[in-house]
Amino acid sequence: MAAWAILSKGVQRAALGAVMAFALSAPAHAIFADDEARKAILDLRERVAAQQQQLTEQRQQMEAQRQQMAEQRQQMEAQRQLIESQRQQLVNLRGSLDQQVNAAGQRLAEEGSRLSRSLLDLLQQIEGLRAELAKLRGTDEQLAREVSRVAGEISEFQRRQKDIAQGVDERLRRFEPVKVTVDGREFMVEPSEQRAFDAAMAVMRRGDIAGAGKGFADLLSRYPQSGYRGSALFWQGNALYTARDCNGALTAFRGLIQAAPEHSRAPEATLLIAACQVELKDVPAARETLRRLLADYPQSEAAPTARERLSRLN
């Protein structure tokens, strides 16, 4: 900072000296009248100011470079310390690895010695077995025949056991409950129960309405607590309604709704109850049934049909 100030003052003195020399070389009466002299002085002042500005900027640049170099020295020192720390870590790691390698080498040497002793013991046992085998060679053929006979008997016994087990499994499967899904409901049923329901449905599909009704009635009689009960009552009611037995159909449909009001067939059964009531000329009851269907099952597929029939009955 002091050096820059001295340099600036030197430049100022040089400029002033030049101005004084110019002033002394002119006549005294022309010092303040000479416009060119004043212009020269102003130009000189501007050059001096420009040089001072340039020197100030150079000084600021050098100061910034000095600060940058100081920061770089700090960074280099930090990097040097980091490298030294990593070098020390590598030295420590190498020492640890050397210790582990030495320990592993010692363990391998001990293991090799133990394996050598074990191998020697095994060789001695093999020699002993060879001696015993030599003694047993005389009975090899007899033993081979005996082993073959026993193996045949065992094979035959296993085959019989397998046949017996398969037969038992088949008989047991006929009585084991099975899982079925009907009308969106999943439940366990006896095999005979499943066969009875499937047979009744097959008869229904063939168009034998009377036979189907009897089949569902038999199923409900034999298995009153069956998981098929709701579906069997629905199809029994359909068979009776098709056979124009409206009173019997009403009993079946009402039994379904009473036993399982949440059953997926309950809305359709309610709609068929109203149809039976219309057939029996009980229109007020049919209207009440349709209103109950719309109240209990408003989102069911049967609801639009119930709404249409109710409007016709009104």
Image: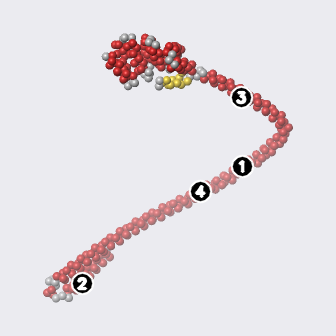
Q: Residue at x 28, y 73 (%)?
A: 53
Residue at the disc numbered 1: 115
Q: Quadrant of residue 294?
A: top left
Q: Position of residue 81 (x, y in %)?
A: 47, 63
Residue corresponding to mark 3 = 158
Find disc 4 in the rendering and name its residue.
Answer: 97
User: Looking at the image, do the residues carrying marks 4 and 2 touch, with CB atoms under 8 Å apart?
Assistant: no
Quadrant assignment, res 92: bottom right
Q: CA distance from mark 2 to mark 3?
A: 132 Å
Q: Amino acid at mark 2?
A: Ala
Q: Counting residues from the N terminus, which is met first, the one under dot 1 or under dot 2?
A: 2
47 displayed left or right of 156: left
Position of residue 134 in the picture relative to residue 15 (left or right): right
Q: Which-is-in-front pick, marks 3 and 4?
A: 3
- Callout 1 crowding tier (Cα within 10 Å): few <14, some 14–19, many ≥20: few
Q: Are marks 2 and 3 in contact (CB under 8 Å)?
A: no
Q: What label does residue 32 carry, if any?
A: none
Where is the C terminus found, in terms of image quarters? top left
Q: Which residue is mark 2?
A: 18
Mark 3 residue crowding within 10 angstroms, few (<14) / some (14–19) / many (20+): few
Instruction: Pinpoint residue 76: horizontal percent, then vertical percent.
Output: 45, 65
Which mark sits nearer the N-terminus, 2 or 3? Answer: 2
Camera-nearest residue between 146 and 107: 146
Considering only order in the chain, which callout, 4 or 1, is on the residue closer to the N terminus?
Answer: 4
**Kind of residue at disc 3:** Gln
